[in-house]
Amino acid sequence: MTAARTVSIAIGDHELAVRALPARDLPFPLFPSMGEYPVYDDLVYDGFDRPDDRLRAYRDAIDDAARGKTVLDVGTGRDALWAVHAARAGARHVFAVEQQPEVADRARQAVAAAGLTNRITVLEELSTEVVLPEPAQVCISEIVGNIASAEGAIAALGDARNRLCTPDCAWIPFRIQTWAAAVDLSGRRAALATESLPYVKQIFNAVGHPFDLRLCLGGPAETLPVSSAAAVESIVFDHRRDPPAPDATSTVELTVEAPASRVTGLMLWPRVAVAPQRPEIDTLTGNTRGWAPIYAPLSPGGFPVRPGDTLTVTFERTTSNDGLHPDYRLSVTRPGTTTEPATWTSPHHSEDFRTTPLHRDLFPAS
Ligand SMILES: C[S@@+](CC[C@H](N)C(=O)[O-])C[C@H]1O[C@@H](n2cnc3c(N)ncnc32)[C@H](O)[C@@H]1O
């Protein structure tokens, strides 16, 4: 087993020690969840262009909904993918909103290259600050995080519903969920992938300080669940229903499956229902690289379980002080004990740092 190396990254004026190894030396390399921070680069946007389940599902849904309609594309990205597709599918006009100025510039170039400048207007703003000349009849977005709500979809699309869309607007996607299952990573080496360190640095610098990063798992994560799976959040965008609540708590039960004997944490991943008559995207088992499952560590060596045990999982979502991105908390009962539930807290940008054994291991204090 190659030991993780300690390297140093610059955060502001400080050097921070990080334990990392190249991804190829780790069965399940850890890397930060990125979509909820402004750290997208060409490598990330190249991933969105792949002809995978995500691209196909969105294009099919847009083909079904856009003809003759005024369309809003929230978070159009570098290539204005959905805006261009909607215009080609016959949308009357598309308003494509992008919060990152340099990305909005690139989106404008993509729209010009497609010869669609008269049908698509790129607006360089956060959607919650934009004003449209007319309400949109179709709202397209792919601001679905590795925890579905993590990129601010509830607040941003709630605002779009109130201010930017018609009362009978069609929503693409119309439902996003986060699923959870127990996993056992005991005996596996935990380190950040060296390749992800530039993103770790950018996230800490964007937030202004290090904090307990939300971590994703690379490798064949679909092989890891040792329990049944259940949805801990299910967010439906539909004008006939109440808007999704920004803050919410849910409780689900997971059944431990053979031959599990320990649980070290939960894995969380999104499912995206793009259009009612189209197949849902299961980001864990489907063919897409647009997302990666989150690892929520609960117990470094794992707590004992037996097949058939029930784990009661409580999932809490609370809007952080930026008004957009949620903080999360999980608590999980340990079968057969009266010990306090195991917990995981995952703030979007609080100053909590090295509060978990895993984060203390990944970021050793010198
Ligand atoms: C996951 S990428 C998706 C890009 C493209 N729509 C696609 O699906 O390939 C999300 C993009 O939305 C932008 N974004 C996220 N929330 C936004 C908001 N509320 N308003 C404007 N842009 C947003 C991000 O900067 C990023 O470029």
Image (tube, rainbow, N blue to C red):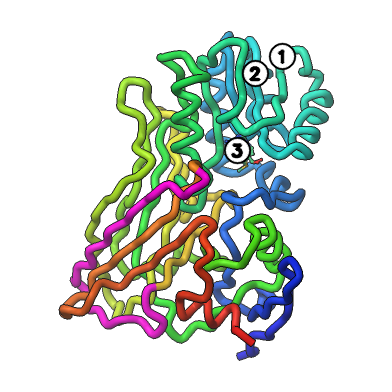
* Label 3 crowd bin: few (<14), some (14–19), many (20+), radius 10 Å: some
Residue assigned mark 1: 119
Find residue 50 and report its image quarter.
Answer: top right
User: How far apart in space, not on screen, are marks 1 and 3 (Cα)?
Assistant: 21 Å
Residue assigned mark 2: 94
Which stretch did the figure color magenta?
A: 298-322
- State which quarter of the image contains the N terminus: bottom right
Q: Secondary structure at mark 2?
A: strand
Residue at x 30%, y 25% (from the top left corner) = 241
Q: Secondary structure at mark 3?
A: helix
Residue at x 46%, y 14% (from the top left corner) = 166
Query: In this rendering, does residue 68 appear at all?
Result: yes
Is label 1 in contact with label 2 (beta carbons under 8 Å)? yes
State the image coordinates of residue 93 (x, y, percent, origin top left).
65, 13
State the image coordinates of residue 178 (x, y, percent, origin top left).
39, 50
Label 3 near ligand 1 (CB < 8 Å): yes
Query: In this rendering, does residue 217 appear at all?
Result: no
State the image coordinates of residue 135 (x, y, percent, origin top left).
54, 13
Above or below, 189 against 128 in this view is below
User: How far apart in space, not on screen, are marks 2 and 3 (Cα)?
Assistant: 18 Å
Q: Is residue 302 magenta?
A: yes
Q: Amino acid at mark 1?
A: Arg
Q: Please tell me the numbered disc located at residue 55.
A: 3
Above or below, 125 against 40 in this view is above
Q: Is residue 322 left or right of residue 88?
A: left
Q: Is residue 293 magenta?
A: no
Q: Amino acid at mark 3?
A: Leu
Is label 2 in contact with label 3 (beta carbons under 8 Å)? no
